[in-house]
Structure formats: C-alpha cells, structure tokens
Amino acid sequence: MMRQVALGTVELQTRREMLDLVVVDGKARGIITRNLLTGEIEAHEADAVVVCTGGYSNVFYLSTNAMACAVTAAWKAHKKGAFFANPCFTQIHPTCIPVHGENQSKLTLMSESLRNDGRVWVPKEKGDKRPPQDIPENERDYYLERVYPSFGNLAPRDVASRQAKYRVDEGRGVGETGMAVYLDFRDSIKRLGADKIEERYGNLFEMYAKIAGEDPYKTPMRMYPAPHYTMGGLWVDYNLMSTIPGLFVAGEANFSDHGANRLGASALMQGLADGYFVLPYTLGDYLAKTKLDKVSIEADPFKAAINQVNGDITKLMSIKGTRTVESFHKELGRIMWEYCGMARNEKGLLKALELIPKLREEFWTNVRVPGEANYLNPELEKAGRVADFLELGELMCRDALERKESCGGHFRTSTKLQTMKLKGTMKNSAILPLGSGMDQVKLKLGTKKNSNLKTLNSQLAVINRGLYVS
Ligand SMILES: Cc1cc2nc3c(=O)[nH]c(=O)nc-3n(C[C@H](O)[C@H](O)[C@H](O)COP(=O)(O)OP(=O)(O)OC[C@H]3O[C@@H](n4cnc5c(N)ncnc54)[C@H](O)[C@@H]3O)c2cc1C
C-alpha cells in the first residue's frame, strides 16, 4: 500500500479515528471518522471496507499494547451486524516487567527469548524477603522445571503465566510488591559467559536495567504476566470477509488463525500473510464479482451513522460528572484481570457480569470529559474507547461463562479431569480430583517412583496445560 501512496494512487488520511461503519443495502459501503486534530466528523464512501485496527488487550487497562489500541472500529462493526468470534480468548504474556505502582498505564514486554537461557524461580518459603543472592539453591523452587520437566522454562505462554500467578497467590512472589517471579541468568552466565549472554540479550538487559534499576547480569530479573494479544476478533471467512459483505478484517482485529492460543503462529506473520497474500486476491475478487451501486455520503445510512456518532459525543461531553475516564478504565481493567484473566470460574464471571453493567451505567451518568468536542481532545477519544471496552468486557465474560472447557488462553478452574490411565510401567490410574475452583491436582499413585512421576507430569503438562501439580 505504501508503494501506492508513493505513486500517488492512494491518499493517506492520518489522525483520523474510525467511529462507525456504514452499511448500505446489507453491504459495507463506508466509514465515519473523527479528525483527531479538529474534531470534525467525516464520512467516507467506499466499495469495500478493510479494518486492520489491531487487538483489544487494553480492555484490561494495563497491557503491553500502545494506548491507542482499542476495540472501537471492530466493536462498531460488530454493532452493525458483523459477528465477533472468541472474544474471551486473550493471551497473557509471561515475561513482562511487573507493575510497580498505581499511576502506571503501560506494561513493558520483555522478549520471550529470555526464557531460552533464564531460569524461572521463587523462594520455597512463603514471604521470604531475602535478596535473591542470599537464597541458597536448596531453598529455591524452579517451579516450571519441577512441574513440567519436559518443557521446563519453555512451557507455553498460558501455562507459564498461570504458574507465575499461582506462586504469587501462594505468597511466594518476590520483589517489593510480591507480584513477581525471578528470571535468573546466573547459571547461563556461568555456563556460557557474560559475553555470550550479552551477545544474545544485551539490548533487553539494558532495557530492563533502565526500567527496573537493577543489573540483570548480577540480580535476577523480576517478571510478571501481562495482557498482550487477543486471539478473538471479528469473525472472517477464508477470504477475510466478515459476516457483512464488503467488510474485510485483517491482522489482530480478526479472529482467524490462532484459536485459543497464539503460540503456533506469529502475529506479525499473520498480518503479513493477510495483507500480502490473501487480501489482494480476495478483495479484488469481491469487487470484480459484486454489483455495487454508487453511494453518496448524502445518503440516509451515512446521515444516520453521523447522527449516531455526534449523539454519542454530545452525550459524553454533556455528562460533566465527577469521575475521570481513566478511573473507569482502571476499574474495568481490574474486573477483567480478576475475573476474566488468566483463570476463570463461574462464580467470578457471574460477579463480573454484575459489576460491569453497573460500572457502565455509572460511566454514562458520572464520567467527566474535559475540553471541547471540536478540538484536539485526547480525553474525549479515550472516553469513546472506554465506552466500547465497557461493552466488550461484558461480551468477553459472557463468552468465557458459556465455554465450560479449558483451552489455551481460556482456562476454567473448574475443569474436571477425573482419571487418566497411564500405559507402561504403572499399574494404577492417576486420580486427578479437582476441587471446584481449587485448580489443584493431587496425584495418587500406586507406585511413586520418581521416573514415573516425571513421565506422568510431562504427560499431564500436555493434556492438562497449566494446572497446578503439587
Ligand atoms: C510489545 C509487543 C511485542 C510484540 N512482539 C511480537 C513478536 O515478537 N512477534 C509477533 O509475531 N508478534 C508480536 N506482537 C504482536 C504483533 O505486534 C501484533 O499482533 C501486530 O502488530 C498486529 O498488527 P495489526 O496491523 O493487526 O494491528 P496494529 O499493529 O495494532 O495496528 C492497528 C492500528 O490501527 C490503529 N487503530 C486502532 N483503532 C483505530 C480506529 N478506530 N481508527 C483508526 N485507526 C485505529 C492503531 O492506532 C494502530 O495504528 C507484539 C506486540 C506487542 C504489543
């Protein structure tokens, strides 16, 4: 596309936010945008619409995504009839710099490659506040290596994330807040030398040192999971067309390719494949085969969409309540993190479904959006996005409640695995009673040989990813 921009055949309209989709005679025929600099509401007619507006991890408030990442474009399309698939499938990345305070709005991702050489651990004792260097080897719990011997520190993202949360919830988290686990390079440095580690991860170590104020060559990094990627999105067919003819969706904004877990496929590759290899053919095919009447931005569907957008903006500006947009976003984020985050259960999801509508109601009666609508106004932009997150959050919880199974990024704590028969040397079945909400597996084995336990554990890791094996 940028080649066409350079050739002058495509005009970029930057600093615009898509606030609605226009559907004419059942087909996507345009969008409504707000000029972020002037506040002007603009209508654009089109033969087809392609939405590539990224994921919605910011529904959790704190995430690794940029602040402008929002669900608004996809959500408005959904409200116009496009199906939304797998909204609750979200990925929480295990290696991010932990939250350090109340006034933080972003979380920094540290590349997952670090787990190639870093060992993840927490102290064996709850509440152990000694500096990591003072905790002897036999008082450390390298829990990923212990619980998943065949995957070790390279356990999948959802598994590693949940395990970190379990350790923290058990009271074995580290650092000032207790909301972190260690990622330790001591052994790799001993084995390979600091130079090799610098060659592999020097930039990341430097970044960590700048943010965390600690030298990871000497002190283990502190890590905690953070919302990072959303596998759900607008439903599309193999041609990347949504359920609204003429509305195509590419990249993280669509639901395709990743299922409940993104590990099998690179997100960037999906974006490239969608943009380079799929859309140029399927969009052209649609345009070639579809009879499209001329549309004008003076037509009723455009006027109706503009009225809707203007109405929402006027409403937001006129509430003049007492709470900031940010405070609503934070509260929603806490609800989502708590009840629709790394692990979900019926009780929690029902609670979230009680809390979110109440919060949304308060938002629409008590939010305060300062400034003017017809001018640069980041608070107004945020308010619109949070209004949509408040609706999406509810859909995510409903989806999570509907799905009784556990899969990838969607882990239901009440999943019951009652028996698993092992072949080979072990005579007895492994009994895996899972107390509702306890999320804990106890292994009762006839023969408790270590080697058998090891095999069992790794099989469990495959079948029952992310469960706590004590
Ligand atoms: C810190 C970080 C590291 C990552 N590392 C990797 C990696 O190593 N490998 C990998 O495969 N993936 C990685 N990912 C994921 C990958 O970067 C994203 O999935 C990918 O960039 C999504 O591309 P996209 O074009 O679909 O959306 P985005 O890149 O998110 O682009 C969407 C654009 O749409 C704009 N937009 C949003 N809403 C609107 C609206 N209403 N109107 C107008 N514009 C709008 C946004 O501002 C943004 O510019 C990483 C993500 C993050 C955050």
Image (cartoon, grey):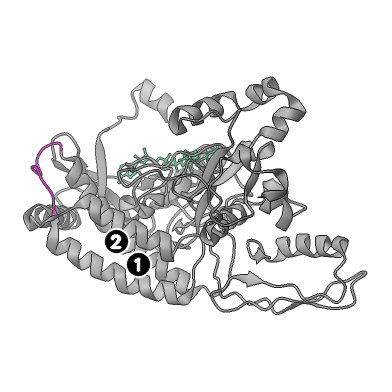
Residue 435, given in percent of the width and then of the height, sits at: 60, 78
Residue 439, given in percent of the width and then of the height, sits at: 59, 70
Element carrying mark 1: helix
Magenta segment includes 374: yes
Rendering quarter of residue 352: bottom left
How far is disc 2 from disc 1 in space, using C-alphas?
Answer: 7 Å
Q: Residues within 10 Å of mark 2 (few under 14, many from 20)?
A: many
Magenta segment includes 215: no
Q: Which residue is mark 1?
A: 394
Q: Which residue is mark 2?
A: 390
Quadrant assignment for the C terminus: bottom right
Q: Amino acid at mark 2?
A: Leu
Q: Residue at x 88, y 71 (%)?
A: 423
Q: Residue at x 18, y 65 (%)?
A: 362
Q: Which residues, given as a range, are shown in magenta?
A: 368-376
Instruction: Name the side, left or right, on which 283 lies relative to 413.
Output: left
Quadrant assignment for the N terminus: top left
Q: Amino acid at mark 1?
A: Glu
- Closer to the camera, 170 or 274? 170
Residue 274, given in percent of the width and then of the height, sits at: 51, 43
Q: Residue at x 58, y 43 (%)?
A: 182
Magenta stretch, main secondary structure, is loop
Task: Give the quadrant of ligand 1.
Answer: top left
Instruction: Name the side, left or right, on which 280 lies relative to 53.
Output: right
